[in-house]
Amino acid sequence: MISRPTGLNLSFLTLIGWALFLGVLTGRAELMVVAVPLVVALAAGRRAKAPTAAWQISRQVSADRLVEGERVSVTVTLRATEPLALVELLQPLPPQVWPERGRNHAFFSLGPGQEVRWTFELAYAGRQRLRLADLHLRLWEPLGLAAAETRHHEAHSEVAVYPQVAPLRRPPRPLRTQTFVGNHVSPAQGEGLEPGDVRLFAPGDQVRHVNWRATLRLGALHVTRHHQERNADVVLLLDTLADVGPAGASTIDRAVRGAASLAAAYLARRDRVGLIEYGGILRQVRPGAGRAQWERLLDTLARASVVFTYVTRDLEMIPPRVLPPQALVLALSPLLDGRFVRAAANLAARGFDLVLIAVSPVAAGRALVRGGPVADVAARLWALEHRAYLDDLRRDGLTVVDWDGVEPLEAALARWHRPRLRRAHA
Amino acid sequence: MTLRLAAVALMAILAGLPLSILPSLGALAALALVVGGAGAIAASVPLATAGGALALIEYALALVVAGPDPDPVTGTAVAVGLVLLLASIHFASLTQGAAVGYPVIRSQARHWLSIVALGVVGAAVFTLGGEALALALRGAALPLVVAASAVGALMTVAGVIALVTAPRRDA
């Protein structure tokens, strides 16, 4: 650790110089006397040594995983083995993180063997991977004429802030189901609870399936068939080509919250859920089920951000194990970049069961602009234009759900109803 | 904020002290107070240094124009004020927006006062040494005194510069 002189030395030297110059110029001894305490202070400051390894420091973070809105506490413990006249501690904060309670910059004065605990609470804008930088520690000479600086590295310095999840009772029903047992009524007939077609009795049919009412009416034994209950593959397609809105409430933040809510709802129904982040970086999570998959999805969603690119990603390059042909594709997008709309339309044209959840950029964009009649009119025009664009997409055959990102996703989905299919497709 | 107000008060004393010798220096005192006070409020060490330099010029003018008897006590008081002014404003600029407890301020005040006490002792030794030297050199030729003073001043300046600029490796 190297102790370096600070700018205050120049101030002292300036005043000493003035005192000596004026003393010589005027021939007054008092001005020479003025220089003496200044020189003594300068010399005393330069003689002060910065103690080396005279402290033990540690930093604890209250949690390594949080949900948006929760606060994280950082506790720094500093223990001095030698006297520390003035210690400055600074915890640099990443962008979009600010101290909610306490300060991230503090000064302490410690005697030998003394310990101090410094706690502050951090707030942040939206989901992210919050990386706390190394703690800066600076030892000051009491007068401020010299300082020695070092950094303290702590291994556990990352906090994952996951998006908020809103409960969804009725997520969009998939058209096609998979082979494993689940909660969706499959168009295919077999063992299940949901009654299906009625047909003539055939050898091998169980007596408990006999439909007595149809048998009496038609004069021959009839049985009721049932729909199988199967799981489904759901792929969330997240548009990260463009973003608008303030940090923590941007269109991507809202889309990520919607995606997390949908993932939670489908995973709770034992479906397999995957994720494709369609942006500058094409991140993929293969469809899967269970707790581990939930963690995987949250980790990927927490990282989702705009990475600018001119390249148009081709979804045909995505392997079927990531985008199964029978999957329900839920695309979440503010529809600000035509490349995403073309990719979604391409998927629908290839026969994918695609639902486009359009996260309106109008409310998010309006939050960035100050109030005023011009801004209000512009926002209304933008909203009209957005609505017309959605109507165009619907006319082109896409299934579009309009969501402003503020109201619960459940309410937006409730306005759109998918009819239950009774006939088997294959 | 308390520290800054204390620095403003200190600056007022520094600017007001020469007025007790020569009251007609009010304009210069006001200028020193404005510049130094702005430095104290803004926690700007360069501005405070400028204010301190103006106070020194005002003090020198007062001494030259009024021509009072030599008074090392006032000179020491001005020096103590300047040391405390720079230290307090530098500390205020450091701690802007930071959490600072009263133990830290107490500890700092203790350190500053000890350094100031050391400075006062140094000024007293300098004054007494000057008196002794004046007695010893009474009757000596003027060129000899001037040459000895010039060498002494040069060595002092060289020593201070070497002390300040040399990087020290503690570990």
Image (cartoon, rainbow, N blue to C red):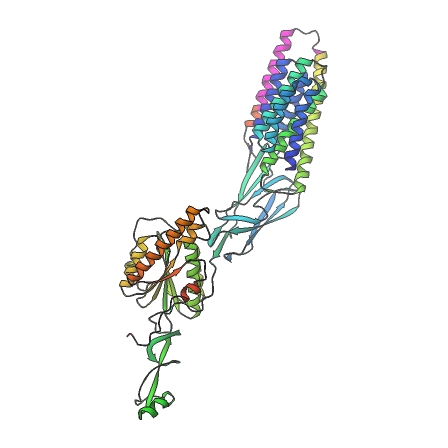
Q: Is residue A137 visible?
A: yes
Which quadrant does the C terminus of chain A fall into? bottom left
**Which residue occupies the foreground of this view, B136 or A294?**
A294
Against A283, is B74 above or below? Answer: above
Looking at the image, which residue is at 71% across and 9% down?
Answer: B138
Find out whether residue B152 is within the magenta segment: yes
Q: Where are the magenta residues, as a range?
A: B136-160
Q: Is residue A28 visible?
A: no
Q: Is residue A317 left or right of residue A22?
A: left
Q: Is residue B106 left or right of residue A351?
A: right
Measured from the top left, where is residue A276 in percent x and y? Answer: 36, 59
Q: Please tell me whether the stretch drawn in magenta is mainly helix, strand or loop.
A: helix
Looking at the image, which residue is at 43% across and 47% down?
Answer: A373
**Which residue occupies the foreground of this view, A38 or B15?**
B15
Find out whether residue B141 is within the magenta segment: yes
Against A138, is B127 above or below? Answer: above
Measured from the top left, where is residue B42 in percent x and y? Answer: 58, 33
